[in-house]
């Protein structure tokens, strides 16, 4: 069987315009059954509409903060830098893949982008807005391939079924997080402090967002490998080629 081809959104250097892609994302897709294809950000709207005809799935990767106007807020203290080009391209890509019911996985910024695209919102900065919570370090103080907190998965979630577990250790490299999930999404996992770490859409071929970085963990943690494998399998199943 042909492997599915999965498009990944790149980051870029806003000063030089250079695209950037961590090979951890492309290696993870390659090692878990897919052909990764890095997408540029300088896409026209028509290009974004056409791409789901060619690609079998979309991976929205980690990156800078989404501009607060995208979810109807003023910019608060603690919000970080954003990329107008990336916000525009990634939202267009998300909507065009979503309309065609193609499998979509969001990682870190990706879960936030999916939630915002579907009408939810996010905390612009956890430290500034959730100072009353137990002090879990969502920006972990050590290497990214080591887990730093747990996520409790909803026992009836797709993610629990994929992970074959209801409590998984994850890494944590974020200062923002989902606040109000979009109506069509359900909470699939939360950290012990209540921070939402995973969303999914029931009745969609594969629409899952995770706040952690499975691309750093898939060599050592089954749940991370299974997530990429399930994504690749969903892309292969819904491939029209
Ligand atoms: Mn976290």
Image (spheres, rainbow, N blue to C red):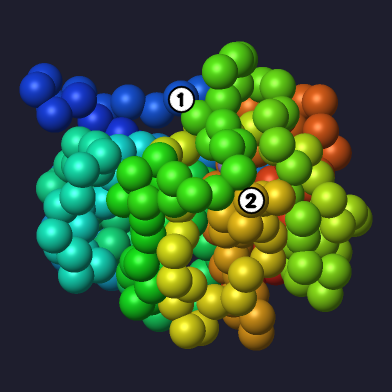
Q: Secondary structure at mark 1?
A: loop
For label 1, the residue is 22
Q: Residue at x 57, y 58 (%)?
A: 196
Q: Quadrant of residue 125?
A: top left
- Label 2 beta carbon less than 8 Å to ligand 1: no
Q: Which mark is residue 213?
A: none
Q: Is residue 53 left or right of residue 20?
A: right
Report the front residue among 26 and 125.
125
Q: Quadrant of residue 97?
A: bottom left
Percent position (x, y) of residue 110? 44, 51
Q: Quadrant of residue 30?
A: top right
- Quadrant including the N terminus: bottom right
Q: Is residue 190 left or right of residue 23?
A: right
Q: Residue at x 64, y 32 (%)?
A: 171
Percent position (x, y) of residue 197? 60, 54
Question: Which callout, 1 or 2, points at the residue further toward the start of the chain?
Answer: 1
Report the front residue among 73 and 238.
73
Q: Residue at x 70, y 22 (%)?
A: 146
- Quadrant including the C terminus: bottom right
The total number of labels drawn is 2
Q: Which mark is residue 193?
A: 2
Looking at the picture, does residue 105 appear above or below residue 201? above
Looking at the picture, does residue 205 appear above or below residue 131? below
């Amino acid at each position: 069987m042909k492997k599915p081809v999965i498009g990944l959104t790149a980051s870029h250097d806003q000063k030089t315009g250079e695209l950037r892609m961590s090979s951890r994302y492309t290696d993870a897709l390659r090692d878990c059954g897919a052909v990764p294809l890095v997408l540029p950000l300088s896409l026209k709207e028509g290009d974004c509409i056409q791409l789901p005809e060619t690609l079998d799935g979309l991976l929205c990767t980690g990156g800078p903060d989404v501009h607060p106007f995208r979810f109807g807020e003023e910019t608060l203290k603690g919000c970080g830098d954003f990329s107008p080009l990336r916000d525009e391209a990634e939202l267009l890509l998300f909507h065009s893949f979503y309309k065609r019911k193609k499998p979509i996985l969001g990682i870190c910024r990706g879960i936030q982008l999916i939630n915002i695209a579907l009408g939810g919102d996010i905390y612009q900065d956890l430290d500034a807005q959730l100072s009353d919570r137990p002090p879990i370090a969502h920006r972990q103080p050590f290497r990214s391939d080591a887990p730093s907190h747990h996520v409790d998965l909803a026992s009836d979630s797709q993610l629990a079924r994929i992970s074959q577990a209801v409590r998984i250790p994850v890494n944590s490299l974020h200062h923002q997080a989902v606040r109000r999930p979009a109506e069509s999404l359900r909470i699939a996992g939360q950290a012990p402090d209540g921070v939402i770490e995973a969303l999914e859409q029931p009745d969609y071929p594969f629409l899952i967002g995770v706040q952690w970085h499975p691309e750093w963990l898939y060599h050592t943690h089954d749940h991370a490998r299974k997530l990429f494998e399930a994504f690749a399998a969903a892309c292969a199943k819904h491939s029209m080629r």
